[in-house]
Structures are given as structure tokens and as C-alpha cells.
Image (cartoon, grey):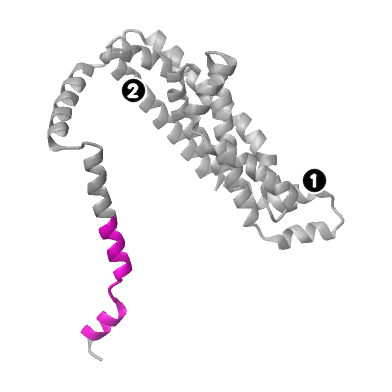
Amino acid sequence: MSATVAAREAFKPSWTARIGLIAVALYSLYAIGQLDISWARLSVGFGEAGRFLARMVPPNFARWELLLEGMLESLQIAVLSTVLGIIISLPLGLMAARNLAPAWISAPIRGVIAVCRSLHYVIVAILFVKALGFGALAGVAALTVASMGFVAKLFAEAVEEISMKQVEAIRATGAGPGAVLLYGVLPQVASRFIGFSLYQLDSNLRNSTLVGIVGAGGIGGTLFAAFKRFDYDFVCAILLSIIALIFVAELVSGRIRAALR
């Protein structure tokens, strides 16, 4: 068999994949037409974007007290919601793990976690603003729910992947459920759980700037007010500050991960 024939046999054309790609391309063209996306609109949009960006330069840090107050509130919302979310997610994740908990416990807990993940955190923030009023409390509650949905799900999946031999060995000594979790389960998932927690802190730092737009506290409220006043140079200052905060948080979390390896 020649090399060409062997190559053809090894890489046979998949008509299913080709038909699928053609269907995706046709539907994309159909969606573009339905959404009224055209080169004329894009060219006008690019021109408007250029004028908008020109009004943002140079950034205005004259109101740095207001900027610092909003950034500190966003940081507090992110840290507090992450801590509360992790504290609640730890028992939820253990109860949702199907290799540790019976189905009559794990199934309802998984349903609770799915509910926490089903709604976007901005929608949850709007609900809490209506229930609790404007301010940081609504933001903390919304991001705590979001943290529960993310961390508890990943923690439950990590627990389901552990080796049960170590767990059975601890049980064979006559240890109770608490000792089994402490010595048989948590040592196998501790590093991953810390990684999930650090990632959620990064995520909450970004999200805390957005929930303020709907009145849940933080720098988002200041940003939205600056947009409404057409104060675009101050908007640029706020955006640069948010980017700087995320970069610092990324550096700190990276150092923590490196120290735990």
C-alpha cells in the first residue's frame, strides 16, 4: 500500500462533520440577516467608537477619593462573598458527592447547587436589591449565591474523583464520619479546593464591579453614574483602576498557588 493510499485510509472524509459545518455556516448567515448586521452599521459604529474613546483620554483622577471609596467597597464585597460562599460550599460539596452521600441526600443538594448556578449573578443581584434594598448587602448576598453554585459543584466533582481506598482504610480503623472526612477525604482534595477558592475570589472581584450597576454597591454604581453624566474621562479612570485591581489580585493569587505547590 502506497503512502498516499495509507494517508487516505487514515484520514477518511467525514461527511457528517462537513454537513454539520455547512449547516452552522448557513445558520450564521441567516442569523446575521435576522439581526440586521451589515457593513454600513459596522462602519458607523467604528466611527462612533473612535469618538467615544477620544473623549475618554486622558483619564481624570481628580476625584480619587470617590474612586478609592468605590474600589474598597468592591474589594470588601468580593472578599466577604467569597468567604461566605466557600464556608457554605464546603458542606454542600461533601453532601453532593455521590460516592460519600446516599442518593436521598446528594440529589436534593445537587438541585440546590443547580438553582444557584441557573441565574446570572446580575439577575440575582436585582432580586436581592428588591428584597434587601440598595447597598453592599445585596451585592454580598448575590455573589455569595454565585460562589455557592460554582465552588460547591466543582468541589463535589473533585470529591467524586478521589481514591476510596484511603477512605475505606480510615473507616476500617473504626473512625467516625468526621475523622473520615478530615483524614481520608480532605487531604486528597485540599489543593484543588484552594485553587477553586482563589479562582472564585478573582471572579468575584470582577463581578463586584458589575453588580453595583444595578444598585448592589461597589465601584459599579460610581461607574454607571459617570456614564449617565457623560463624564467619560472619569469613566476611563475607573476602568483603569478596575484593571489594576484585577492584575494585583492575579499576582497575589499566583504567589499563593506557587507557595502551596
Mark 1, other Cα within 10 Å: few <14 / some 14–19 / many ≥20: few
Q: Are marks 2 and 1 in contact (CB under 8 Å)?
A: no
Q: Is residue 101 visible?
A: no
Indicate which disc residue 212 carries: none
Q: Earlier in the sequence, mark 2 or mark 1?
A: 1
Residue type indicated by callout 2: Leu
The spot of residue 46 in percent (x, y) is: 16, 29
Left or right: residue 246 versus residue 87 is left
The spot of residue 60 in percent (x, y) is: 28, 12
Magenta part of the chain: 4-23
Indicate which disc residue 178 carries: 1
Residue at x 31%, y 65% (from the top left corner): 17
Residue at x 31%, y 17% (from the top left corner): 235
The spot of residue 233 in percent (x, y) is: 26, 14
Residue at x 37%, y 17% (from the top left corner): 223
Residue at x 28%, y 64% (from the top left corner): 19
Residue carrying label 2: 239
The answer to if 20 sits in the magenta stretch is yes
Mark 2, other Cα within 10 Å: few <14 / some 14–19 / many ≥20: some
